[in-house]
Image: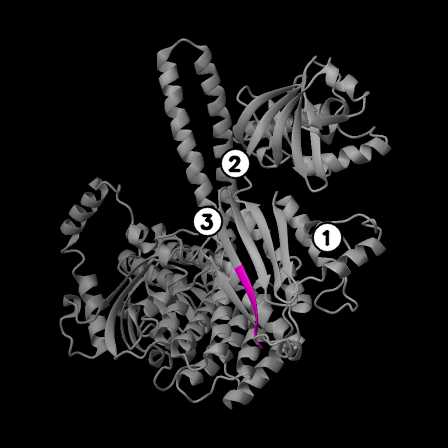
Amino acid sequence: MANADQFKHSFREEAREILVDLESALLELNDNRGDPELVSRVFRGLHTIKGSGAMFGFEDLATFTHNLETAFDEVRDGRLQINSELIDLTLSAMDQIRAMLEEGAEGAPAPDPAVCAEILAKVRHLTGKPESRHKEKKTAAPTLPDAVGGPMSDWHIRFAPGPDLMLCGANPLLLLNELRELGGLSVKASMAAIPPLAELDPERCYVSWEMVLATSATPDAIRDVFIFVEDNCELTIEPASNPVSSAASMPASDRAANIARSNATSAPACAADAIAKALEDIRSPSGGRRVYDKADSASSLRVPAARLDQFVDLVGEMVTVQARLSELAARSDDPDIAAVSEEIERLTAALRENSMTIRMTPIRATFEKFRRLVHDLARDLGKNVELTIEGADTELDKTVIDRLSDPLMHLIRNSMDHGIEPPERRAAEGKRPTANIHLSARHSGASVLIAVSDDGAGINSEAVLARAIERGLAAADTPLTETEIFAFIFQAGFSTAKQVTDVSGRGVGMDVVRQRVDSLRGSIDVTSKAGEGTRVTLRLPLTLAIIDGLLVSIGDASFVLPLANILECIELTQADVERANGKHIADLRGELVPYIRLREHFEIRTPRPPIEQIIVVQTEAGRYGFVVDLVLGNCQTVIKNLGRFYRHVQVVSGATILGDGTVALILDPERLAQDAVRAITQATRGRPTPAAIAAAVKQGLRERSAAPQKAL
Amino acid sequence: MGIALEQSENSSTIRLEGAIDIGSAAELKGHLVEALGAGLGTGKAVRVSLAGVEYLDVTAVQLLWAAERAAKASGVEFAFSGEAPAPVQASLAETGFEKFNATMDAI
């Protein structure tokens, strides 16, 4: 059943989020051990994971979590004290829960039964209770209501599963059991909606339930039980004193029975009313939406990222087609077409803007998960470190966020291991015994700045330089600026660590940071003061889907160079070439800038124009000029990936389609400069030429746009 | 484990064993329709044996309920033979299907 898998998938996603929140709640709890609000947060997180896990068939996970939930139940009741052991145990348990969630996924660590058993044994030792299974019948008063601490009250709950609820793998009967854990529950099933046998869809749930729940839990806590099916059911939760059940003095079970009976028996009498209401619903502007589709049932939607990517892709194609339309409209004299074209241009721009904001998500979840890393590393390294977070609500493209986790992890590990001093050294230097790592994010124009700073020892630039000279990366006699020296840190295999530890020192991490930031078209800035600390700032584009570029042409081919790297454009005449004695060097107001003729580099065999243009770009290795025929102007383009076949072509970071339908390749100046320098010494035969890549991209696009028609 | 339909001269018996849930709902419906069809005009009764049931989910309950209604409407005798085990009955009662075994009317 594909639907069941889909539902499990969505449970996994929800659970992952809950785990992130749980983890930060636990770590906060570690600092504020008496905070009942935090204890409740942890308890509710565990409770939700357990309940929903059981519902979606993660039985082991539910049983395991149940034991932890019991421990936090005791903490809430004051029978158990929060201590480091319980927090560490729960944190390790989170890892196992995560593994159980991801079990079977490629590359995911499998849960370790031995570790699980050990954790449970220790938890049981703390609580002094035997192992219990979550399915065990509650005999006496239920445990959860105290959590919420409110007065006991009766709630009338009506639960009618939507048509697809069963197909999604959810079992309404388990939900009722879950509800029973909140308090005294009386249930009455209503069979009124079951059609005659012949018309009955065997996999659909027609039964609905009327319940009265006596609990001290809040309506929100009751609603939480239905959290995973809320979009797929009709759910009303009302105080039972509501006119619906006027006989409030009756025992709850009788009241529920009454409600159910009145619903069942009054059905025929109300048929005319019901039909009138149904007709009204159909006539209403919402077009007779189902109640469980109502707007207030979900203020946000969970959409698979792939579907969003597809949407943005389509918007990208729309932008391209719109550009062609504008061009055609400009050529035609028809004012009507011009008017329609302008309207479409306006709408497309709004659509593009909107589609980009949909992909924007706050970086909070990524930041928060480092609390655990800092906590664990601090314990392992015997250092006292606090993590502070700033600007967690800063939004950036989901693709960028997804790829940011690894580099941030390496930066933090590096700070923890090399930057922050052992407590005794901090004490000797008169520093605060608890060190600080600060993670921050903020917008700056079309970029976002993510910084990792620490108040540790700072980078020893002399040691870095010495190591660079030793490795032949720098000449002993060339003076280098601090920025140039710090750049060595990001070289592959570069490490000044005398000892390789579990945490860092292999010289791999920082290289990963640079590679990842490069692939995100970002840059790294390092500042450091001896004795005061280090700050590494990553400047990243807000989105990877659109690029501001300069459109240039060589012969018949068009290329886009990212505007971010471009410093200026200058002319290159025959006289300039002769003045330089045929050397590929331009005189830029006295500064000599080497240039690369892209025509030659890409083997484009068309005649050279008398006056060419040099685009001067800033790369890590310094300034370079790229010679092209013509500069066509600025353009904001939607980036298309080249596809797997060309993934090794690093000088091209993507492609875009121009208004006239031709493909322009987006060049990566950094790689292009490296490639050109390498090409001087190596034969370049066998490399795919840009014309071949452009033709292949176009062919791919044509096939893709033809695909839906084939499907019809 | 599962569902079996046994035909005899006077009755069609549907024997339910193990967990009867959404996975076997389509099969159960098929057997119920077949048994009811066999009873039409022949006086052949429909018996549903619950003795070996370990779990009934909501799809099974609503099928049995609809089958009983259909039998009543078409004059076919319909009855449960063999009580559902106590835990199954208890779990049904907990989820609002009271007196399941006594008579389907009570549901």
Q: Is residue A492 left or right of residue A77?
A: right
Residues under numbered marks 2 and 3 in contact, where contact means CB atoms less than 8 Å apart:
no
Label 1 – label 2 distance at C-alpha: 41 Å
At x 44% / y 70%, what residue is drawn? A45
Which SS class for mark 1? helix
Q: Residue flagged by tag 1: what amino acid is it? A: Ile
Q: Mark 1 against mark 3, which lies toward the viewer?
A: 1
Which SS class for mark 3? loop
Can you identify the residue that label 2 sits on? A313
Q: Mark 2 against mark 3, which lies toward the viewer?
A: 2
- Vertical arrangement, residue A596 with respect to residue A145, above or below: above
Q: Is residue B86 left or right of residue A644?
A: left
Q: Mark 1 against mark 2, which lies toward the viewer?
A: 1
Q: Report in which chain the residue with disc 3 lies.
A: A
Q: What coloring was used for the rendering?
A: one colour
Q: Residue A75 location, x and y as percent? A: 44, 84
Question: Are dots 1 and 2 on a single chain?
Answer: yes
**In the rendered image, which quarter contains the C terminus of chain B?**
bottom left
- Which residue is at the far top? A333
- How dense is the environment of label 2, judged by Cα within 10 Å: few (below 14), some, or many (20 and up)? some
**The stretch drawn in magenta includes residue A558:** no
Magenta-tinted stretch: A433-439
In the rendered structure, find residue B15 and report the number of the disc placed on it. none
Q: Residue flagged by tag 3: what amino acid is it? A: Val
In the rendered structure, find residue A303 and report the number of the disc placed on it. 3
Q: Residue A190 location, x and y as percent? A: 27, 64
